[in-house]
Image (cartoon, rainbow, N blue to C red):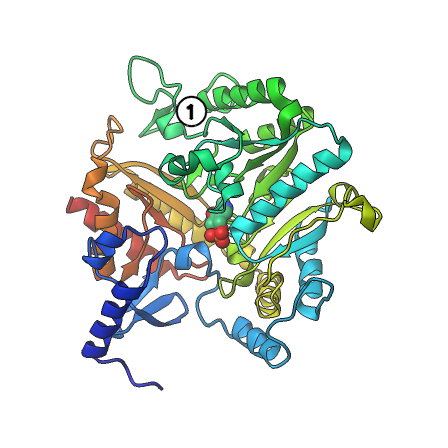
Amino acid sequence: MDKRLNSKQIKNLINLDKKNIWHPFTQMADWVKDVPSQPLIIERAKGSYLYDANGKKYIDGVSSLWLTLFGHRNKKIDSAVKAQLAKVAHSTFLGLTHVPAIELSQKLLNVLPKNFTKVFYSDNGSTSVEVALKMAYQYAKTQNPKTKKQSFLSLKNAYHGDTVGSVSVGGMGIFHSIFKKMLFKNFFAPSPYCYRCPHRNSKGIMPFYNKAKGFKEHCKTTGCAGQCLREVEVILKKHHNEIAAAIIEPLVQGAAGMITMPKGYLSAFAAMCKKYNVLLICDEVATGFGHTGKMFAIEHEQIKPDFICLSKGITGGYLPLAATITTEKIYKSFLGKYEDFKTFFHGHSYTANPLACAAANATLDIFKDEKIIDRNAEKLKYFTALLNKLSRHKNVGQIRQCGFMVGIEIVKNSNTGESFDFKLKTGAKICAALRKRGIILRPLGDTIIILPHLTISKTDIAHIVNSIETELNAL
Ligand SMILES: *Cc1c(COP(=O)(O)O)cnc(C)c1O
C-alpha cells in the first residue's frame, strides 16, 4: 500500500489547490478562506465510504453528487473497466463502432419502454439534454421547413445542466438569471412545489399542506397541483405551434431541492403534451438507475416520452457517459440522401468512451443479477420511517422523498414555513458540522440532500438521519 501523506504534504497540496484551481459551483473566496468548512482531499474510497488524506472515514451520503450506485470500488465494475483497458481505452465513435457500446445499447433498450429504439451517446448530462433539444428542433424542421416550433416548454425550478441550451430551459434563478441575454426563448410553467404553493390563499400559509396530516389529495383538479397543470395547458393551448418539445425532470426536480411532484402530475403533463402534439423529453439524468425506487422515474406513472436523457448513474458513478434515447419516428425523420442535409451534425470527442461503456454494461448486469431494485424495497421503508420521525422537528419544514432521493427543507419556523435568512448559510453550516461526524452531504440552499448509494446499510442510513437531528437540535 502507498504510504499515507504526512500533514506537511497535505498542507502543501491544499495550498496548491487554492493557488491553481477554480472549483465548480463554488464561491472561491469562501473556499480559499475555509468557509464554512475546510477543503478535504479525498484519497481513496471503498463501499459506501470515502477516506480523506488523513485516513478519516466518511459516509458518501450524496453518492459523489448523485452518481455512485453500488459503492466505490465495486468488484464487478472494477474488473469490467480493467478488462476493457487491456483492449482499447478510446477510439472515435464517428464512423467506427465498438463492442461495449453495442452491447450497452441493447441492455439499455431492454430496460426501457418498448417505444424507444435508438441510442445516441454523449458524455455528460448537459449534453444528453442538448442533444434531445437539438433533435426535437431539427425534427420539427424536417416535418415542416416553415415550422414555428422553435422554442421549448419547461418548468420553473428546473435544472437540466450547465450548457447554454440546457440553461435556456433551466428555471433556477440563482444559477441562470445572469445569463439571461445569452439564452433562447423558452416557456416556463409553474413548478409543482406544493410546500410553497404560489396558489396558497390570502389568509395564511399552505392551505393544501398540513404538517401533521400531510398533503390533501391535491391532484384532483380542485387542488394546487391542479392549478399548476391548468397553467401548463394554458401555455400549450396558446403556443403549441411554437413549441418543439416540453422537457421535464420526471417525479423529482432534483437540483431545486428534491421537489417531488404530486401523484398524477407527471402522467397528466405527458397526456397534455400528446394532446397538443408537443414532443416530450424526460430528463432522467438524476432520477434514472434506481434512484426513485424503480429503474426509471417514468415507470411510476407509465408514461412513454419521445426522448429520455440518461447520465450520472449510468456507469455506476465511475466514468463520464450519457445517452439520449429516442423513438423510430424521430430517428426516421433524419434519414435521407447525404445531400439532403438531414444528418444530425452533433457529436463529442469522447462520445461512447469504451471504458465508460464497459462500466455501464457491468452496472446494468448488477441491477439484473443482484435484483437491486426489488431487494431495496424494505430498506426504503426503513429510510422513510426514520424520515417521518425527523419531519416532526421544529426546524424541518418539509421532507420530500422519492426512493433514495431526499430533500429536507430546513426552516426557522415550521408552523409558518418561514425560512432562515439565506446569508446565514444554515444548510452549509449543518453539512460542515456533519462532516465532523463522518458524513459528507452537500446541501442545496437550506435543503439538506441525502442521496445514498443503493447499497448503503441501514446502520449508515440511521447514522445520517440521527446526526442531522442532532445538528438541528443545536441550531
Ligand atoms: C446533473 C443533472 C444534469 C447535468 O448533468 P452533468 O453531467 O452535470 O452535465 C442534467 N439534468 C439533471 C436532471 C441533472 O440532475
Q: Secondary structure at mark 1?
A: loop
Q: Quadrant of residue 51?
A: bottom left
Q: Residue at x 58, y 41 (%)?
A: 282
Asked if residue 292 can be seen in this view, the reply is: no
* Horizontal and vertical percent position of residue 186: 53, 30
Q: Quadrant of the C terminus?
A: top left
The x, y position of residue 71, in whole percent, is: 44, 66
Residue at 70% across, 70% down: 99
The local crowd at label 1, few if under 14, some if 14 to 19, many if 20 or more residues have their Cα within 10 Å, is few
The residue nearer to you, when weighing 324 against 301, is: 324
> What x and y, as percent, mark residue 457?
39, 62
Look at the image and tell me whether residue 39 can be seen.
yes
Q: Position of residue 366 (x, y in %)?
A: 58, 65
Q: How many marks?
A: 1
| Image quarter in which the N terminus is found | bottom left
Give the vertical position of 234 relative to 53 (above or below): above
**Residue sticking out furthest to the right:** 337
- Which residue reaches farthest left? 474
Disc 1 marks a residue whose amino acid type is Lys
Please give the residue where the numbered disc 1 appears in the rendered image: 216
Outermost residue on the front side: it is 339
| Image height of 426 relative to 212, above or below | below
Which quarter of the figure has residue 464? bottom left
Write the residue at 53% across / 32% down. Answer: 154
Horizontal arrangement in the rendering, residue 182 relative to residue 132 (left or right): left
| Left or right of residue 324: residue 207 | left
In this image, 366 relative to 37: left or right? right
**Disc 1 C-beta below 8 A from ligand 1:** no
